[in-house]
Image: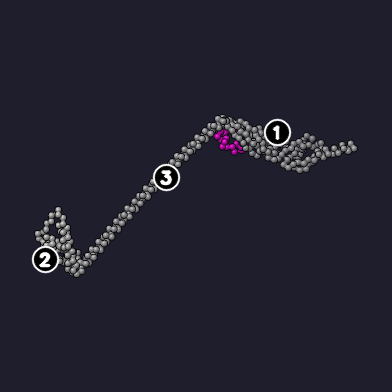
């Protein structure tokens, strides 16, 4: 009975040591008699008991590694407290097992030294502006060295970049001064644009007023010209009608009577003024001669219509008309 129990225990140990189940995204390195033998892939694997053993177990997943915080000095001799996080992945389990005694520590130390070297080439302001460049240079430097360790560095990210308190206060004052400067520039630009808008508005208003005045003067001149033309047309029409009336039978006698009436009216208006001295011609024939001269001018205007081409002198007014006119004046 005891032998059976011993055989059972040995069989269980033999099975346990000979059957290995590797999880997904893992790789196990097997050594046979202390020498590398094989790499077990995910799934069911069989080993030779007491001859083969699993020496190393590696995860093939992407692994985040926190890089401890450290003090870096920039090109302009400013201290910065920097820490970051590194992402890597085991690509060759054999090299990861035998290439370095501890590839995690090696990657961490290499990331810190590379970061100090990269930041030492930059000034303080550039370290805040060029984080992507810093991350890329750190990844490139670590990745070249990590090839012998069977590790692929995927990316590096700076988590915190903290300057001393004095530098922070100076940066805050600089930012405040810069914002005040921008505010002053914006205010001056606003005033400048306001003055430009006012000047432009005044210029456009002046042009509009001048155009309106110009158009008003043009309209006024055109109205006056139209009025003059209308008056001239009316006067010409009246003269034509008077000339036509004179050519009618009895027209000359009517003109003589009209001239006589105008003369009598003129002498009457002068006589009404007490302060005016009225001198009556001694020879009334002079008045009749004045009327005859007026009629001669009118008859001269009608000369083209005559047959002989010479003006026709009308007979002097009748003595009866002259005597009546003289008596009325006296």
Name the residue at 13% across, 54% down. Answer: 277
Q: Write down the residue under mark 3.
A: 197
Q: Nearer the viewer, mark 2 or mark 3?
A: 2
Marks 2 and 3, the one that precedes in the sequence: 3
Q: Position of residue 119 (x, y in %)?
A: 59, 33
Q: Position of residue 325 (x, y in %)?
A: 13, 63
Name the residue at 11% across, 60% down. Answer: 330
Q: Write down the residue under mark 2.
A: 319
Within the image, what quadrant is residue 91 found in?
A: top right
Of residues 242 and 312, the one nearer the viewer is 242
Residue 237 falls left or right of residue 29: left
Report if residue 91 is visible in the image.
Answer: no
Report if residue 173 is visible in the image.
Answer: yes
Q: Residues within 10 Å of mark 3 (few under 14, many from 20)?
A: few
Marks 3 and 1, the one that precedes in the sequence: 1
Residue 98 falls left or right of residue 211: right
Q: Write down the residue under mark 1.
A: 102
SS state under label 2: helix
Name the residue at 43% across, 41% down. Answer: 191
Marks 2 and 1, the one that precedes in the sequence: 1
Q: Quadrant of the N terminus?
A: top right
- What is the span of residues highlighted in magenta in the rendered image? 118-138
Q: In 3D space, how far apart are the residues under numbered discs 2 and 3 (Cα atoms)?
A: 88 Å
Q: Is the residue under label 3 in contact with that under label 2 (CB below 8 Å)?
A: no
> How many numbered marks, from 0 up?
3
Q: In 3D space, how far apart are the residues under numbered discs 2 and 1 (Cα atoms)?
A: 160 Å
């Amino acid at each position: 009975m005891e032998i059976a129990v011993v055989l059972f225990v040995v069989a269980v140990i033999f099975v346990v040591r000979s059957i290995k189940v590797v999880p997904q995204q893992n790789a196990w390195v097997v050594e046979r008699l202390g020498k590398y033998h094989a790499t077990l892939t995910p799934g069911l694997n069989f080993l030779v008991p007491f001859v083969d053993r699993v020496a190393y177990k590696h995860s093939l997943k992407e692994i985040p590694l926190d890089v401890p915080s450290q003090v870096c000095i920039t090109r302009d001799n400013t201290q910065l407290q920097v820490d970051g996080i590194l992402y890597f992945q085991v690509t060759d389990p054999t090299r990861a097992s035998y290439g370095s005694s501890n590839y995690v520590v090696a990657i961490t130390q290499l990331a810190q030294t590379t970061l100090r070297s990269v930041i030492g080439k930059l000034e303080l302001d550039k370290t805040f502006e060029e984080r992507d460049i810093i991350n890329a240079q750190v990844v490139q430097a670590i990745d070249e060295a990590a090839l012998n360790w069977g590790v692929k560095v995927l990316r590096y990210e700076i988590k915190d970049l903290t300057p001393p308190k004095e530098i922070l206060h100076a940066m805050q004052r600089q930012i405040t001064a810069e914002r005040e400067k921008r505010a002053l520039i914006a205010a001056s630009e606003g005033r400048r644009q306001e003055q430009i808008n006012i000047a432009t508005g005044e210029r456009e208003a002046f042009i509009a007023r001048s155009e309106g005045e110009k158009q008003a003067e043009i309209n006024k001149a055109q109205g006056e010209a139209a009025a003059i033309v209308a008056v001239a047309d009316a006067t010409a029409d009246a003269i034509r009608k008077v000339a036509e009336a004179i050519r009618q039978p009895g027209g000359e006698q009517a003109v003589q009577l009209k001239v006589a009436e105008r003369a009598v009216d003129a002498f009457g208006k002068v006589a009404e003024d007490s302060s005016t001295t009225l001198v009556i011609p001694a020879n009334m024939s002079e008045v009749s001669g004045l009327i005859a001269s007026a009629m001669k001018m009118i008859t001269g205007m009608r000369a083209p219509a005559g047959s002989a081409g010479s003006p026709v002198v009308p007979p002097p007014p009748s003595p009866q008309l002259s005597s009546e006119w003289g008596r009325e004046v006296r």
